[in-house]
Amino acid sequence: MLRIDVSKAKSGMKLALPVQNPRVPARSLLKVGYELNDGIIQKLREHGVRSVWVRYPSLAFLERVIDLETIKNQQQIVAQVASTFEMLQTKSAAKLPYETYIESIQQLIDHLIGQPQSAVFLGDLAQAGAELMRHSSTVTYLSLLMGLKLEGYLVRERRHVNPARAKEVTNLG
């Protein structure tokens, strides 16, 4: 599998991962295995899709590293952050639904712990339209990875707290 810019896409290429709608990240535009043609490539550009993952035989090993569950978890977080930024533009008192956000972060953490190999390309998989949303998602992701790597340090520094609670990084996300 290979990630390419939509401007470099050619008719006949087959998708290795679904193409998400940049305006509604939870919605797929095209499914895995779809064969691109010139008309579809033009429509992807019109929808604001920047890049797609296509099948590429010599890079097939990447399919072990990139999985749809990780993509789904991160897209959920991106969608929530995007929604909040949209509310901020129209209302001065918009607030992120904290409990929902915490649940999404916890799902991402659980998946990263269970499938650590999927973390390699997670940053490339956020197909958010606005740079601010992409940046927010990336900062969340990197913060979580740093917290997970510092698990032993957190337990040592928080001796007065139960070790299970000391290494909790959900709030960091």
Image (cartoon, rainbow, N blue to C red):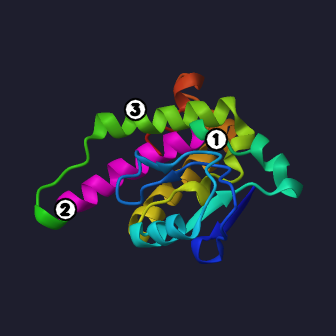
Asked where in the image residue 53 lies, by quadrant, the reply is: bottom right
Looking at the picture, which amino acid does disc 2 mark? Leu
Q: On the picture, is 85 further left or further right than 30?
A: left
Q: Secondary structure at mark 3?
A: helix
Mark 3 highlights which residue? 103
| Region rendered in magenta | 70-88
Residue 78: horizontal and vertical position, in percent?
41, 52
Looking at the picture, which amino acid does disc 3 mark? Glu
Q: Residue at x 89, y 57 (%)?
A: 58
Q: Secondary structure at mark 1?
A: helix
Picture disc at residue 148? 1
Q: Considering the whole magenta stretch, tell me its main secondary structure.
A: helix
Looking at the picture, which amino acid does disc 1 mark? Leu
State yes or no: discs 3 and 1 in contact (Cβ < 8 Å): no
Q: Give the distance between the C-alpha atoms of the residues marked 2 and 3, in whole angstroms.
A: 22 Å
Q: Residue at x 33, y 48 (%)?
A: 80
In the rendered image, the vertical position of residue 58 relative to residue 89, given as above or below: above
Mark 2 highlights which residue? 88
Circle 2 or circle 1, nearest the eye: 2
Asked where in the image residue 51 lies, by quadrant, the reply is: bottom right
